[in-house]
């Protein structure tokens, strides 16, 4: 059983991570600041550290520095917000093995943990492989809830028409509307449904590592390349490659992506061999890419490659009648994730949830339900909604 130390000052988030990773078969300890993390590391051995960048008494970089001074060689994955991507670059230069952006996606986190443990100890990593593969698959392909509102009905009718075609799809919608759910649904209804669905968050991708994420690399091709890495194009070969927040790609990365799409071939970083790939591209953005083209920030030729079909995902405020059904779905899903009985929601609480505007859309609703399940009593009441909902 791999031992993981979580260094995170957000108690609620740390508790959620500890509970969930514990269910995946890991032994978890949590530290809310650097002093406590130092004590844990002085008295116990760990196979992996998950550390937030922003911590009381310092940051994740300070922890890396302390570990190096004390001769501790433990793989460390940095957890960071989008605003701190440059600090994530610095952390990797100082010895962090990987990074993951918040809000953390469970399937992506498990994959990064597995990669880190494999690089440090293949035997140790293998202990969790069978159970993790089964659970990762479930997380990577979550249950869909389309909703019964007119807006939802129109959206998923269009998805059903588009999915069986081989055409590239661009999904437009505000942050948190469920664009990745739509992408999953397109894959499930396509002729590639029995092949891989691979998702890449372009908003969290560091420019320096983009080529490796897309095309892979060979061991020793750059500092930190301690093992061969399979890129997303090869992982998705025969299936669907989903690029979330594609508008955040830097211009030079756009050039590399366009070449891969046009030639249907990729070359891993540091390799002399090209690999033929067959993927269907489904992309998503909350930006107006045509305006980005006018500003010279997005290539027009790449846009036309990605947007053969354009699908708009409506914000939750345009489908408020779906809130009760979505709420119950998230209650069941999250309760199952934490291994606890679903909590009932009284009618006043449900009415209050339905009346909110949800600027963060479906993702915000899910986050609120998760908070309510963890922090409320036996029944979720309107007082709980007022206390714990930050909408």
Image: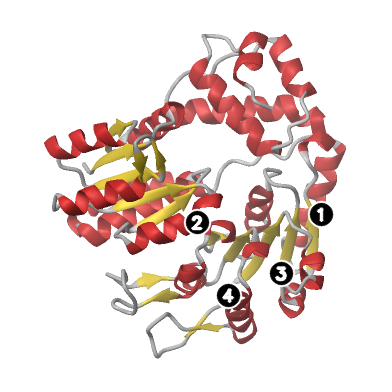
Q: Mark 3 points at which residue?
A: 168
The first of marks 4 and 1 along the sequence is 1
The residue lying at 38 percent from left, 54 percent from top is 112
The first of marks 4 and 3 along the sequence is 3
Q: Residues within 10 Å of mark 2 (few under 14, many from 20)?
A: many
Q: Tell me where residue 19 appears, x and y as whole percent.
A: 38, 30
User: Looking at the image, which is closer to me, 68 or 290?
Assistant: 68
| Res. 227 image quadrant | bottom left
The first of marks 4 and 2 along the sequence is 2
Q: Decide: marks 4, 2 in contact (CB < 8 A)?
A: no
Q: Work out how far the residue at label 4 is from the one at label 2, CA to CA, in angstroms.
A: 16 Å
The first of marks 3 and 2 along the sequence is 2
Q: Work out how far the residue at label 4 is from the one at label 1, CA to CA, in angstroms.
A: 31 Å
Q: In the figure, is residue 164 to the left or right of 343?
A: right
Q: Residues within 10 Å of mark 1 (few under 14, many from 20)?
A: some
Name above or below for residue 98 compared with residue 253: above
Q: Which of marks 2 and 1 is in front?
A: 2
Q: Decide: marks 3, 2 in contact (CB < 8 A)?
A: no
Q: Which of marks 3 and 2 is in front?
A: 2
Q: Work out how far the residue at label 4 is from the one at label 3, CA to CA, in angstroms.
A: 19 Å
Q: Nearer the viewer, mark 3 or mark 1?
A: 3
Q: Work out how far the residue at label 2 is from the one at label 1, CA to CA, in angstroms.
A: 36 Å
Q: Work out how far the residue at label 3 is from the one at label 1, CA to CA, in angstroms.
A: 14 Å
Q: Nearer the viewer, mark 4 or mark 1?
A: 4
Q: Name the residue under label 1.
A: 158
Name above or below for residue 260 compared with residue 22: below
Q: Tell me where residue 48 appears, x and y as whole percent.
A: 26, 47
Q: Residues within 10 Å of mark 4 (few under 14, many from 20)?
A: some
Question: Is residue 133 at least partly visible in the picture?
Answer: no
């Amino acid at each position: 059983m791999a031992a993981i130390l979580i260094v995170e000052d957000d108690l609620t988030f740390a508790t959620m991570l500890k509970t969930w990773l514990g269910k995946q078969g890991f032994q978890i300890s949590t530290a809310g600041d650097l002093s406590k993390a130092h004590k844990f590391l002085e008295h116990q051995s760990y196979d992996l550290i998950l550390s937030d960048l922003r911590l009381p008494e310092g940051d994740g970089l300070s922890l890396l520095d302390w570990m190096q001074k004390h001769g501790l060689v433990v793989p460390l994955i940095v957890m960071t917000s989008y605003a701190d991507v440059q600090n994530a670059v610095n952390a990797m230069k100082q010895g962090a093995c990987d990074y993951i952006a918040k809000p953390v996606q469970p399937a992506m986190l498990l994959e990064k943990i597995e990669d880190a443990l494999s690089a440090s100890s293949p035997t140790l990593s293998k202990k969790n492989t069978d159970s993790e593969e089964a659970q990762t698959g479930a997380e990577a392909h979550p249950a869909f809830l389309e909703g019964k509102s007119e807006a939802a009905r129109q959206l998923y009718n269009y998805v059903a028409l588009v999915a069986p075609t081989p055409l590239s799809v661009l999904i437009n919608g505000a942050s948190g509307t469920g664009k990745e759910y739509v992408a999953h649904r397109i894959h499930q209804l396509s002729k590639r449904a029995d092949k891989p669905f691979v998702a890449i968050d372009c908003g969290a991708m560091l420019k320096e590592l983009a080529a490796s994420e897309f095309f892979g690399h060979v061991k020793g091709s750059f500092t930190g390349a301690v093992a061969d890495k399979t890129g997303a194009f090869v992982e998705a070969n025969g299936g669907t490659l989903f690029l979330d927040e594609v508008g955040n790609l830097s211009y030079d990365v756009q050039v590399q992506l366009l070449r891969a799409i046009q030639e249907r071939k990729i070359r891993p970083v540091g390799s002399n061999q090209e690999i033929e790939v067959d993927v269907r591209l489904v992309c998503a953005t909350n930006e107006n890419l045509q305006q980005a083209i006018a500003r010279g920030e997005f290539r027009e030729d790449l846009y036309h490659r990605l947007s053969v079909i354009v699908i708009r995902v409506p914000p939750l405020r345009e489908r408020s009648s779906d809130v009760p059904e979505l709420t119950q779905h998230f209650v069941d899903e999250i309760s199952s994730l934490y291994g606890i009985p679903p909590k009932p929601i009284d009618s006043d609480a449900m009415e209050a949830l339905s009346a909110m505007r949800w600027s963060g859309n479906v993702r915000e609703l899910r986050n609120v339900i998760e908070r309510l399940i963890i922090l409320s009593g036996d029944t979720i009441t309107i007082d709980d909604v007022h206390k714990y909902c930050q909408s």
